[in-house]
Image (spheres, helix red, strand yellow):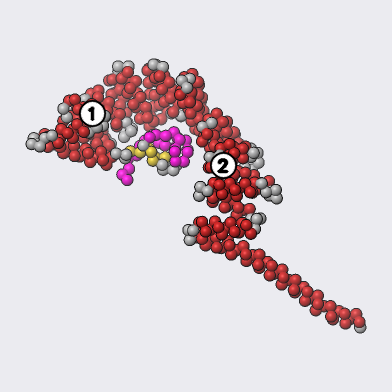
Amino acid sequence: MNFETWWLLALPLVFGLGWMAARLDLRQAISEQGALPRSYFKGLNFLLNEQPDKAIDAFIEVARLDPETTELHFALGALFRRRGETERAIRVHQNLATRPDLPDTEREHALYELGQDYLRAGLLDRAEDALRALMSGPYAASAKRVLLELYEVEKEWRKAIDAARELQSATQQDYSVQIAQFCCELAQDALQRKQADEAIGWLEQALRENPKNVRAPILLGDVAMASGDLGAALGHWLGIERQDASYLPLVADRVVKAYRDLGEQGKALEWLRGLLKTGLAPELLDTAYRTELELAGPAAAAALMREQLRRQPSLQALTRYFDARAALAAPAPATADVAEGNGAPAADAANATADATPADATAQEDAAIRDLLQLRTRNLARYTCRECGFRARLFYWQCPGCNRWESYAPRRTEALG
Ligand SMILES: [Zn+2]
């Protein structure tokens, strides 16, 4: 009987204690879950309302409350770097990289991010150290890619060649275009130091790496020209036609100069006229016009531009056609100025004649049209990067916008803004 009474008393007590424990657990769980989502949602709300600064503050609060949220730390670090706040990104990633409780892969991830932060901040030595520590493991290939970027920034072309070769064998991706360009960079360095033989060595290596590389024959021609071997220079430049004829306009001025120095002006004219017929304008148009005007006179230049307008109409050809007409109308000594692209003499000639004869009136109209065209076509033709769309007046082997190599086609595009 005593035993039964004890049971009757103990059972409700045990249930009661169990119920209380469950309530306590639940309350704690609710308070834990409740604290995190509130800041998360606050942060998300700020992000959605395009208030990134307040969003970051909210997320920092979450990260402070719960240091275990490494994913959030990584996200914050990446966000800081993207916003250019490299110091804050470095602090977040440094904190992660030095935490002893993190597994190796997370610590390597932090080092990889840190390497990119340092690179962005211009702390190149530190970036190299961080990335060099990752040469094996899951972040090896990514770290090597950033390291290659770093060597390009540092203009450490030999190291860049080694890094590209390593990447080539590790990732099975083709880096021959880049390696050939690095060889060309080294050749240019050698040329600046007047080390012609060393330059030639690098350029030949560039062509072995990438036989389609056009920069190497351009530079080989420059080396030959500097040593006075005009025939060899012409051989290198004209040989580009066999690689990719669309790059010929890049060497048009050089070819014309070499022919002229050789006293073979006729060949220069013949070469340019032939190329215009193949549709490589508008890049060649300026060189062709100037050369024709200088060597064959304004009537021939006007005829060439008229022919070009029929074949491939463009604002640039139209402008040059009116330039040629102005050169024809202008007194003889003014021709040289017009050839330089300076329209002043023709305009003066037009303005000077208040009592206009029919011919003067035509000249005046021509000048007005030409001025208008020049205004409209100035800065019109641009090289455009295929990868990022960066437009530039000069031709670049490496895009200043996205740092990709050979992303510019050698053709300028005429696009009205
Ligand atoms: Zn680009």
Res. 214 image quadrant: top left
Residue 409: say if magenta: yes
Please tell me which of labels 1 and 2 falls first in the chain: 2
Residue at 37% x, 29% y: name it. 250
Is residue 146 depicted above or below 236 in this figure? below
Q: How packed is label 2: few (under 14 Cα within 10 Å), some, or many (20 or more)?
A: many
Q: Position of residue 329 (x, y in %)?
A: 16, 30
Residue at 15% x, 35% y: name it. 350
For the question of whether residue 316 can be seen, the reply is yes
As drawn, the label of residue 118 is: 2
Residue at 44% x, 38% y: name it. 400
Please tell me which residue lies in front, 343 or 285: 343
Res. 136 image quadrant: top right
Residue 118: say if magenta: no
**Considering the numbered disc 1 on the image, is that residue within a helix, a strand or a loop?**
helix
Is residue 150 depicted above or below 87 in this figure? above
Please tell me which residue lies in front, 372 or 351: 351
**Looking at the picture, which amino acid does disc 1 mark?**
Asp
As drawn, the label of residue 177 is: none
> Which residues are drawn in magenta?
394-417
Please tell me which residue lies in front, 17 or 242: 17
Q: Which residue is mark 1?
A: 337
For the question of whether residue 140 can be seen, the reply is no
Q: Position of residue 188 (x, y in %)?
A: 46, 26
Residue at 38% x, 35% y: name it. 394
